[in-house]
Image (spheres, coloured by chain):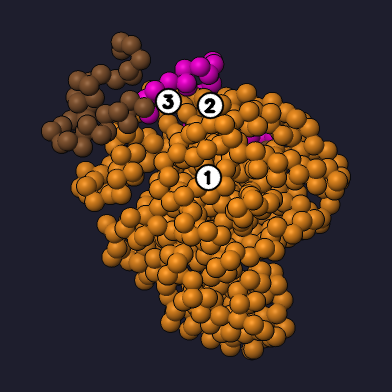
């Protein structure tokens, strides 16, 4: 098989070929390393590439499979981790030169679980420094570039994960999502990004941004791959105090294609916010498609949506500044200036502001639960705009010009507050050829319904089959 | 606090020093308007009727989530 084709097969497709030994993990890893070699001078997805380690792992996987020891659907699959997931013996920078030489002793739980599943780590992925920004800009290791147009942002903070997955450099990547950092780059790069329920995927061994808002999640090209990744990484971890003891289903059982009588709510207030008409039109078409598939779509009201930025922003800034306070004192002048100023500003948030935001969070979550008693899912755009230029401070969303950070987190932050699952799936392209994402959010622990609807929509459309021009 | 400014320059400088920032750094001239902007934006929390709600310090599944 052509090497480029291998790079664009999903984990599901690759696993079927690996299992029957029609393709070897060695071929797959070589193809991906070649793809990275061809594209990463443009994209800058990787901070650390692990070619020799990956080739050695591929040879071991090939040998195990030939010996009849096939571990499952991720055996031999190339993965990449955002560079805030600790990897034992491999430097983990959190996207900052301050940690250029930090080499953890141990893997994070997610890395361990991928390794146990037989996945092969290709490298550590570029990111907005300390995950504190939604654009994928990084002065230390270079900005990330969107595979659909390298002059535009990937979105962030898991920007390298977005570009690597979209460009066929990795089959599965991991990001972390505190205000949208999995779903934002997924939408802007034209891939699938799942923020699972808080506590379902371990945060152990990840550099925190906000303890109570951080959600690790998979970034992939198909909904099936999101399910396969979740099968490997979800589940209780005694090393994470927030980890929840829940029975973990087989997430692939959600992939039925059947959304008949599924109730989907469309919050009216989301469409009253600044929104690019091209994005709005693509999402309206997606709504029509889901109705055609048998879903029942109704308008709902989500009045507290207008306060999501204030609630999430207050909590996030206070927690980020608390976590990074020593770093700020010691190395503040070495931080990426936009990150430094956010961390410093967080020092001025009072305990009363923080607790007021957490009180407001209770009210916000109560309202969301009430809405989700009437519908199974909430639907919206993931992003109000397509990818803006790198370093753009403002974006045009419909008739309004607004700050880039506020725009990019507008629709994603509500579900970091609630802790419930939310996914972004491709739902179209702008006239200029940039991807548009559809967000579906569900009840806590109801990943199965989120995946079911996303998969049914994906299979009824061909957006996920398009490839960037790089 | 008077007017639309959520924090005065003097209060900002005092709190900056308390937080360990160098009160003589020219960087504070850039930080001051940013802090004002942040504190203004979170004022909207006062518009939410939180009643007697206790702070939701982290996501916890409610019985109906099960």
- Chain of the residue on which disc 3 is drawn: B
In percent of width and height, residue A78 lies at 55, 72
Q: Secondary structure at mark 1?
A: loop
Which image quarter holds the N terminus of chain A? bottom right
Viewer-proximal residue among B62 and A132: A132
Tell if the residue under mark 2 belongs to the same chain as the one under mark 3: no
Label 1 in the same subunit as label 2 = yes
User: Is the residue marked by circle 3 packed among few (<14), some (14-19), or many (20+) residues within 10 Å?
Assistant: some
Which chain comes out orange in the rendered image? A
Say which element carries label 2. helix
Mark 3 secondary-structure assignment = helix
Marks 2/3: CA–CA distance: 10 Å
Mark 1 → mark 3, Cα distance in angstroms: 19 Å
Above or below residue A171? Residue A21 is below
Observer-nearest residue: A464 or A251?
A: A464
Task: Identify the chain of the residue marked 2, using the numbered disc in the image.
Answer: A
Mark before the other along the chain sequence, 1 or 2: 1
Query: Given the image, what chain letter belongs to the residue carrying mark 1?
Result: A
* Residue receiving disc 2: A307
| Most distant residue in the left direction | B24
Chain B display color:
brown
The residue carrying mark 1 is: A180
Q: Is residue A244 visible?
A: no
Which residue lies under the disc numbered 3? B41
Q: Residue at x 49, y 75 (%)?
A: A38
Q: Is residue A38 left or right of residue A234?
A: left
Residue A195: assigned label: none
């Amino acid at each position: 098989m052509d090497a480029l084709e291998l790079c664009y097969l999903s984990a599901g497709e690759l696993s079927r070929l690996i299992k029957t030994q029609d393709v070897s993990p060695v071929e797959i890893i070589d193809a991906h390393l070649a793809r990275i070699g061809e594209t990463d001078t443009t994209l800058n997805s990787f901070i650390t590439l692990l070619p020799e380690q990956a080739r050695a792992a591929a040879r071991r996987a090939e040998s195990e499979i030939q010996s009849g020891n096939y571990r499952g659907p991720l055996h031999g699959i190339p993965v990449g981790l955002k560079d805030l997931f600790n990897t034992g013996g491999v430097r983990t920078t959190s996207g900052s030169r301050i940690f250029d030489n930090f080499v953890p002793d141990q893997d994070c739980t997610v890395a361990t679980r991928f390794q146990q599943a037989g996945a092969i780590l290709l490298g550590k992925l570029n990111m907005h420094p300390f995950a504190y920004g939604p654009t994928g800009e990084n002065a230390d290791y270079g900005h990330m570039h969107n595979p659909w147009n390298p002059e535009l942002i990937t979105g962030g903070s898991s920007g390298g994960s977005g570009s690597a997955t979209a460009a066929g450099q990795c089959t599965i990547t991991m990001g972390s999502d505190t205000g949208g950092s999995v779903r934002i780059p997924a939408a802007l790069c034209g891939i699938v990004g799942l923020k699972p329920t808080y506590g379902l995927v371990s945060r152990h061994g990840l550099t925190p941004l906000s303890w109570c808002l951080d959600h690790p999640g998979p970034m992939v090209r198909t909904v099936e791959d999101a399910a396969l990744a979740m099968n490997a990484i979800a589940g209780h971890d005694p090393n994470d105090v927030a980890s929840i003891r829940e029975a973990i289903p087989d997430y692939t059982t959600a992939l039925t294609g059947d959304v008949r009588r599924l109730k989907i709510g469309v919050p009216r207030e989301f469409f009253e916010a600044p929104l690019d008409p091209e994005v709005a039109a693509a999402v309206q078409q997606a709504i029509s498609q889901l109705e055609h598939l048998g879903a029942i779509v109704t308008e709902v009201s989500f009045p507290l949506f207008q306060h999501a930025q204030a609630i999430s922003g207050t909590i996030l800034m206070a927690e980020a500044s608390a976590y990074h306070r020593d770093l700020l004192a010691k190395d503040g002048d070495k931080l990426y200036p936009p990150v430094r100023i956010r961390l410093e500003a967080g020092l001025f948030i009072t305990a009363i502001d923080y607790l007021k935001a957490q009180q407001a969070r209770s009210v916000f979550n109560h309202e969301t639960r009430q809405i989700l008693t009437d519908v199974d899912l909430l639907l919206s755009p993931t992003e109000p705009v397509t990818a803006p230029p790198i370093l753009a401070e403002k974006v045009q969303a419909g008739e309004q010009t607004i700050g880039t950070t506020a725009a990019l987190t507008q629709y994603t932050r509500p579900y970091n507050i609630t802790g419930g699952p939310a996914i972004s799936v491709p739902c179209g392209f702008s006239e200029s050829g940039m991807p548009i994402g559809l967000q579906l959010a569900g009840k806590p622990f109801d990943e199965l319904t989120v995946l079911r609807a996303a998969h049914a929509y994906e299979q009824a459309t061909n957006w996920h089959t398009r490839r960037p021009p790089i | 606090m008077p007017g639309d400014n959520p924090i005065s320059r003097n209060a900002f400088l005092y709190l900056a020093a308390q937080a360990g920032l160098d009160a003589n750094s020219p960087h504070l001239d850039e930080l001051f308007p940013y802090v004002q902007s942040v504190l203004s934006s979170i004022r909207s929390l006062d518009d939410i009727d939180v009643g007697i709600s206790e702070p939701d310090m982290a996501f916890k599944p409610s019985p109906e989530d099960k």
